[in-house]
Image (cartoon, rainbow, N blue to C red):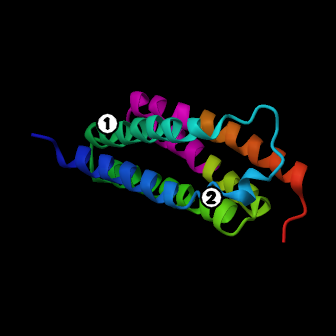
């Protein structure tokens, strides 16, 4: 039987992926933006986020299971919920509002939430913390892409 932490973590990852996908219309506005040479092809983002969110779900379930008490479990929940909030804010800013400049400010908070996850999870479960590292690396690269798009296309109104 699948445990409740696994179901919650998997459900959260699926919800983040679905909402993120729905908030990321790849239409003419995005297609016409000037992008840096290192911009991955559009088809790569879906599989990348699927793997990253899957690893994050594994991390959440592992950290929950490794947490020795209610205080540690509360920390795990707060860390992942904070990250989820910042994860959900980026796409609407960039794609729906068409404000890559605002998304560039927000991505700093998303990145910081990932650093907080790695640091906060490490004493609970180094394994769970390491599962977040690909997410941190991808968001670091995405922040650079965001910066490059702002630099190449500003100003935004």
Label 1: which secondary element? helix
Find disc 2 in the rendering and name its residue: 90
Mark carried by residue 62: 1
- Front residue of 65/111: it is 111
| Point 39% across, 38% down: residue | 54
Residue 52's spot in the image, x, y percent? 48, 37
Q: Earlier in the sequence, mark 2 or mark 1?
A: 1
Q: Is residue 97 left or right of residue 5?
A: right
| Point 61% across, 36% down: residue | 138
Which quarter shows the N terminus?
A: top left
Q: Residues within 10 Å of mark 2 (few under 14, many from 20)?
A: many
Asked if residue 105 can be seen in this view, the reply is no
Q: Nearer the viewer, mark 2 or mark 1?
A: 2
Label 2: which secondary element? helix
Q: Residues within 10 Å of mark 1 (few under 14, many from 20)?
A: many
Q: Is residue 114 left or right of residue 121?
A: right
Q: Which residues are magenta?
A: 112-135
| Point 35% across, 36% down: residue | 58
| Point 57% across, 38% down: residue | 43
Magenta highlight on residue 9: no
Q: Give the overall secondary structure of the magenta segment.
A: helix
Q: Is residue 19 left or right of residue 107?
A: left
- Rounded to the nearest angstrom, the CA distance separating label 2 from label 1 is 26 Å
Name the image quarter holding residue 136: top right
Residue 5's spot in the image, x, y percent? 24, 47
Q: Say above or below: 13 vs 88.
A: above
């Amino acid at each position: 039987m699948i445990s409740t932490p696994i179901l919650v973590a998997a459900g959260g990852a699926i919800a983040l992926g679905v909402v993120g996908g729905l908030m990321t219309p790849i239409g003419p506005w995005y297609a016409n933006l000037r992008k840096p040479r290192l911009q991955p092809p559009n088809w790569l983002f879906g599989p990348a986020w699927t793997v990253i969110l899957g690893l994050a779900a594994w991390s959440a379930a592992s950290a929950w299971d490794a947490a020795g008490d209610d205080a540690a479990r509360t920390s795990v929940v707060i860390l992942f919920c904070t990250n989820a909030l910042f994860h959900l804010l980026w796409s609407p800013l960039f794609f729906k509002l068409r404000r890559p400049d605002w998304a560039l400010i927000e991505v700093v908070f998303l990145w910081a939430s990932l650093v907080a996850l790695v640091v906060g999870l490490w004493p609970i479960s180094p394994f769970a913390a390491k599962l977040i590292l690909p997410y941190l690396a991808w968001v670091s690269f995405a922040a650079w892409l965001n910066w490059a798009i702002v630099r190449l296309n500003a100003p935004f109104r």
